[in-house]
Amino acid sequence: MSTEIIRSQAPTRIDLAGGTLDIWPLYLLLKQPTTVNLAIDLYAEATIEWSAKASGAGSVTLESVDQKALIDFHWNELPSIAPPGSLELHTKLLRFFCDRLESTFLPTGPAFDLKLTTRAGSPAGAGLGGSSTLSVAIIGALNEWAQRMGLDHSKNLTSEEMIKIVSDIESRVIQVPAGLQDYYGAMYGGLQSLRWKVGSHDHVSLPEEILTGLEKRILLFYSGQSRNSGINNWTLFKNFIDRQEDVRLKFDKIAEATRNLEAAFQQRDWTAIGSAIHQEWEVRKTLAPGISTPEIEKAFAVAQSISPVAGKVCGAGGGGCFFLYLPVDDPDAHLSEFSAIVEALQTMGIRHLPFHCTKKGLEVSRDH
């Protein structure tokens, strides 16, 4: 058989409001928990290449291009291989599919070679859901591969089934509960409201026609300080469960601000959108020390001295990316202010990340 290739890509997201509310079981203990996020074209990509061998068992290569990590091993080593951390998701997801038809891989493994290569479009530790997006890109490619190879005789996995699998596997990797919003942003794309409920969750696509206007009003920056969202969220999780001070009340206020943001999007009210983003951030940064940083606070102050922007840190805080939103009716009339903000923050060593909104989520294609 000639080499066959499967390619997949999934978008990262800007969490506009309601992050951390997406962690089980926190959303079960809150009033109408909601998260709003926006898919952007800083993609995670996965490529699978496989071809038959004339004789003998094949081998596996796993590679992360952006992390400069690569391992090779034989199929029969898959159950016991100890990969580097940057390839742990790759390994565990491949094991999941191979375990579904274990007899195919024993005792020596199948007679074909497989290479799984990934690339991440967002900086590591940026708070844009990069690792979760990567897992969605990987499972999308592996799901297609399993169907092509006949490894899964039950059925093609649905989007919701894939989200459940990758959230469970990523929790195993990071060793703390994983939030869910990143998987939905990567899987479905667009601007969406995520409503966390008992037994299932609703993802509601907000008006597509406002994406262009939203894109013109948001600036995305990378502080250069990476951090571990899972660990930061775990601190908030413990504080919530331990009923520390007024943490639960603050989470309810974040949920309220997020619902206000959803309503503002439905009404196409650009001023109210900015107010809701500001409302959410003002509560969030009081949840724990270190969610904001002196550098980010200074960046917000510099930007606000140029234009009355709203903004918040992406993800769990403590570094990574943040965005600024300009609540004006005509963003084209304020291009000079945008340029001045970008220039001022770049002189502080903060990197501007240009992006486009994307309506599409996970996409999988096949070459021969």
Image (cartoon, helix red, strand yellow):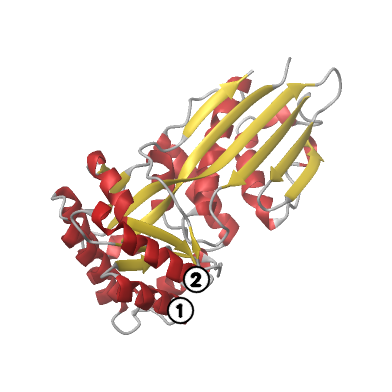
Determine the residue positioned at 42% across, 40% down. Answer: 187
The residue lying at 43 percent from left, 82 percent from top is 289
Q: Quadrant of residue 49?
A: top right
The dot on residue 293 is 1
Q: Where is residue 90, by image quadrant?
A: top right
**In which quadrant will I find the N terminus?**
top right
Earlier-in-chain disc, 2 versus 1 = 1
Q: Which amino acid does label 2 sit on?
A: Gly
Distance from disc 2 to disc 1, alpha carbons, whole Å, reads 7 Å
- Quadrant of image for the C terminus: top right
63 or 77: nearer the viewer: 63
Q: Would you say 233 lies left or right of 90 here?
A: left
Q: Residue 50: x and y, percent?
A: 71, 26
At which x and y percent is residue 167? 48, 50
Residue at horizontal 35%, vertical 50%? 38
State if disc 1 and disc 2 touch (CB < 8 Å). Answer: yes
Label drawn at residue 319: 2
| Type of amino acid at the residue the image marks with label 1 | Thr
Identify whether 236 is placed above or below 86.
below
Q: Where is residue 69 in the image (x, y as percent from the top left)?
A: 73, 51
Which residue is drawn at the image coordinates 75% and 47% (left, top)?
70
Q: Is residue 93 left or right of residue 128?
A: right
Residue 302 vs 103, above or below: the answer is below
